[in-house]
Image (cartoon, rainbow, N blue to C red):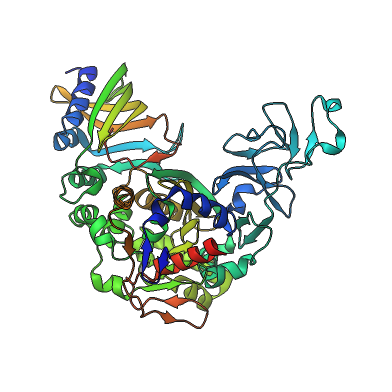
């Protein structure tokens, strides 16, 4: 067995044949996060992305529904839509001019008399299942399988937190997309984002320089650099902080981290007049008790297995696209709360730069370590990866989630690998 | 030193890894900006590959010297090739446009960057200080491996 309770065989990360099978059995079946409804607000809006290795178009085909279409002409196979986003009535293949409406139905074929009419394809292949949870667009390449809400299970709470924090529930993707790539397996990123034992080592250098930087200003007297400095310092939290955080996983391999970070970490955070204005808006809408309940939720990273990692509290979302067994690219998105004070979005952008930026002090060290792991795992001299921290001490919660005995338990890797095994052996 | 020579001097400091001396070229109120998007108009509402004030820029230089800066140990070897220098005279500052090609080598991997660059220079002691530097990488919107060098 490649996956055992507290260890994983290195070939799971390094064998191209296993990677091919993952694309079929995991990325070909699971619900994948594709984006957010704000990216396709009006009829005809579209953007291109990938589901595993399949190039797809996400298209607003009518007021109610979003279509997800395989971006491949039914004729000779060209991409019908160049990479990017926009608004259109038709996707027209650049090769022979076959055209499709925004639902993917074939509309016109030049030299049509040359074809037997009943043999013409009907249109672009539509991805069979598309569903939306609180504005986030998901799709699955499999005809059947669990519904989206069942798939998400307790991880729904993280999306709820993401949306509940926005006055009026209004969120939109904004502020640019980082696309950072690394020479390593896709799973390495998902296994890193809930790992509270790594920052002290991987991020030692950025923690050290941030500690010696000027202290962040008091509310109303902040500096531009404060968000970066605070976030880098936070990575150097004492061991006791990491041990005390909440670490939950779900049966489908999702996971989320809580009790680590609160709103005081943002420049316009607790005590700042801009944050007070934001809180007032939430109170006007939901009442004080509910507003305070929402703001007391302190979720940090959430993993939606197998392709997404997000931070509801600070409105960051990352989608991972596996390119090869040893090559991955991560697209990162920021979200604006449309009805919140504009200054809060500036914090989100500065936060994105330090957490997800391709040139960040922090991210560059993560990418370096992913590559070193991949390099190490390409060696056949040692077979096993050991993921036993906290093994045997997991706590079952009432809502179906399991909680790590401590915040640095490797429960999240074990849960991901259990889900991996379920997909791969089904 | 004229503005063109100053740009060569700056590039030489980077290529010889004299990062502290390079940092000293910047004014206290300097900004150093590598935009994420083509024709990006501002750095506060849209993310940037790098957008630093002087405080943050200093953290980059200090990180490069830290004994556990994994992505910077060893520091990449680079060549910054400056070209097409065009100087616009202004009242208190010069605006200097140039092109930049950077060859980066580290851990058996070599890559090339190309960029349009804008400097705003303030005369100081017969030379200049950099008040603002903007580096528009031609592939800023593309899929990029981590960037741990300075342009």
User: Would you place residue B128 above or below residue B84 in this image?
Assistant: below
Q: Quadrant of the N terminus of chain A?
A: bottom left
Q: Is residue A50 above or below residue A267?
A: above
Where's residue A362, x and y in %?
A: 30, 51
Give the image quarter of residue A85. Answer: top right
Q: Residue A239 or A119: which is nearer the viewer?
A: A119
Left or right: A317 in relation to B87: right
Left or right of A129: which side holds B55?
left
Q: Nearer the viewer, residue B141 or A336?
A: B141
Asked whether the viewer can see residue A161, the reply is: yes
B24 relative to B91 in the view: left or right = left
Residue B29 in picture, x, y percent from top left? 25, 39
Position of the C terminus of chain A, as image quadrant, is bottom right
Q: Is residue A312 visible?
A: no
Q: Position of residue B151 (x, y in %)?
A: 28, 32
User: Which image quadrant for residue A131?
Assistant: bottom right
Residue A298 falls in image quadrant: bottom left
Number of marks in the rendered image: 0
Q: Residue B37, position in %: x, y?
A: 45, 36
Residue drawn at the location 23% of the way across and 19% of the way down = B3
Q: Height in image: A382 above or below B6? A: below
A321 left or right of A47?
left
């Amino acid at each position: 067995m490649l996956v055992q309770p507290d260890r994983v065989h290195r070939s799971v990360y390094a064998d191209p044949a296993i990677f091919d099978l993952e694309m079929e059995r995991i990325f070909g079946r699971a619900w994948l996060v594709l984006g957010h409804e704000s990216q396709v607000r009006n009829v005809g809006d579209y953007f291109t992305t990938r589901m595993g290795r399949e190039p797809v178009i996400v298209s607003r085909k009518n007021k109610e529904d979003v279509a997800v279409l395989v971006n491949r002409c039914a004729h000779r196979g060209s991409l019908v839509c160049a990479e990017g986003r926009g608004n259109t009535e038709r996707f027209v293949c650049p090769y022979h001019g076959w055209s499709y409406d925004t639902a993917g139905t074939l509309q016109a074929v030049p030299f049509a008399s040359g074809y037997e009419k009943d043999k013409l394809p009907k249109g672009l292949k539509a991805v069979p299942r598309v569903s939306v949870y609180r504005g986030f667009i998901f799709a699955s390449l499999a005809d059947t399988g669990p519904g989206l809400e069942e798939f998400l299970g307790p991880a729904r709470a993280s999306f709820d937190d993401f949306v509940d924090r926005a006055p009026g529930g209004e969120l939109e993707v904004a502020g640019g997309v980082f696309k950072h790539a690394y020479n390593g397996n896709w799973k390495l990123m998902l296994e890193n984002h809930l790992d509270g034992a790594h920052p002290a080592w991987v991020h030692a250098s950025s923690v050290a320089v941030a500690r010696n930087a000027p202290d962040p200003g008091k509310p109303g007297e902040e500096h531009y650099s404060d968000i970066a400095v605070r976030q880098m310092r936070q990575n150097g939290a004492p061991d006791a902080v990491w041990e005390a955080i909440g670490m939950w996983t779900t049966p489908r391999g999702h996971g989320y981290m809580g009790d680590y970070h609160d709103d005081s970490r943002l420049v316009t955070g607790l005590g700042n007049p801009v944050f007070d204005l934001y809180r007032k808006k939430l109170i006007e809408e939901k009442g004080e008790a509910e507003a305070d309940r929402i703001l007391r939720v302190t979720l940090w990273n959430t993993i939606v297995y197998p392709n997404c990692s997000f931070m509801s509290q600070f409105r960051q979302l990352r989608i991972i696209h596996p390119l090869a067994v040893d090559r991955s690219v991560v697209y990162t998105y920021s979200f604006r709360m449309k009805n919140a004070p504009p200054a809060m979005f500036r914090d989100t952008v500065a936060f994105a730069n330090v957490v997800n930026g391709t040139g960040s002090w922090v991210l560059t060290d993560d990418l370096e370590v992913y590559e070193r792991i991949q390099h190490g795992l390409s060696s056949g001299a040692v077979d096993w990866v050991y993921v036993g921290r906290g093994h045997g001490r997991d706590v079952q919660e009432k809502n179906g989630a399991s909680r790590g005995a401590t915040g640095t338990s490797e429960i999240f890797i074990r849960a991901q690998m259990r889900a991996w095994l379920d997909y791969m052996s089904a | 030193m004229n503005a063109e020579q100053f740009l060569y001097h700056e590039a030489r400091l980077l290529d010889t890894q004299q990062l502290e001396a390079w940092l000293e070229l910047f004014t206290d109120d300097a900004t150093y900006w590598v935009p994420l998007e083509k024709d990006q108009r501002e750095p506060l509402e849209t993310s940037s590959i790098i957008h630093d004030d002087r405080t943050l820029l200093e953290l980059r230089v200090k990180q490069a010297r830290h004994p556990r800066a994994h992505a910077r140990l060893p520091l990449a070897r680079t060549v910054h090739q400056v070209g097409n220098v065009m100087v616009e005279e202004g009242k208190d500052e010069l605006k200097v446009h140039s092109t930049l090609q950077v060859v980066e080598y580290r851990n058996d991997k070599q890559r090339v960057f190309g960029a349009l660059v804008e400097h705003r220079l303030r005369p100081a002691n017969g030379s200049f200080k950099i008040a603002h530097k903007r580096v528009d990488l031609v592939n800023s919107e593309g899929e990029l491996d981590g960037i741990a060098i300075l342009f």
